[in-house]
Amino acid sequence: MGQGRRVQNTNGPVARHLARIGIILAALATLATLYATLSPRPPGPELQGQADKLAHFAAFLIIVFPAIVTRPRRWRWVVPGAIALGGLIELIQPSFGRHAEWMDFWANNAGILAGALAGAALHPPLRRWQMRRRA
């Protein structure tokens, strides 16, 4: 209080709009990931080794990042939900003619952690940009 800092309204219309966009982008990324991981493999060469793990990492980073960057407090449910989703995908993939792999699960979790950390780190600059737009 003694610092003379002005309290910013984090629930204004622009913040709510960005928060909705974050959830929509996360939902679209989740649907794309579900399609990619549970649909039959297309004919042709499969991703091998590190490329496959990088795809898992990127998919889950892209799921988590937009939800966290637009509202960091979401980590309380987004991170556990994404971890559960990654685990569930690996458990049910054999039912869809795919292979379950522990390393895929760990690559998913690494992407979740990276997305959450990057989102939390980039939230303050996003908020500053948002406040300048409102001014």
Image (cartoon, helix red, strand yellow):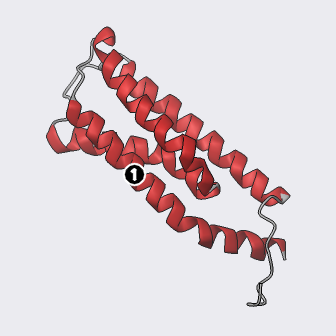
Please give left or right for residue 86 compared with residue 133 in the image. left
Amino acid residing under circle 1: Leu
Point 38% across, 20% down: residue: 38
Task: Decide: is 73 above or below 40.
Answer: below
Work out which residue is located at the far left of the displayed protein and give it.
49
Please give left or right for residue 97 compared with residue 27 in the image. left
| Percent coordinates x, y for residue 130 in the rendering | 73, 68
Work out which residue is located at the far bottom of the displayed protein and give it.
3
Quarter of the image for residue 102 reads top left
Work out which residue is located at the far front of the displayed protein and give it.
2
* Figure quadrant of the N terminus: bottom right
Q: Secondary structure at mark 1?
A: helix
Point 53% across, 62% down: residue: 120
Point 37% across, 24% down: residue: 89
Task: Provide the residue designation for mark 1.
Answer: 113
Task: Decide: is 11 above or below 132.
Answer: above
The total number of labels drawn is 1
* Figure quadrant of the C terminus: bottom right
| Percent coordinates x, y for residue 52 in the rendering | 24, 38
| Percent coordinates x, y for residue 16 in the rendering | 78, 52
Task: Decide: is 129 above or below 120.
Answer: below
Between residues 59 and 6, which one lies in front from this camera angle? 6
Please give left or right for residue 110 compared with residue 79 in the image. left
Please give left or right for residue 49 compared with residue 96 in the image. left
| Percent coordinates x, y for residue 43 in the rendering | 25, 19
Point 58% across, 57% down: residue: 69
Task: Tell me the crowding category of disc 1: few under 14, some 14 to 19, or many 20 or more residues within 10 angstroms, Cα based.
Answer: many
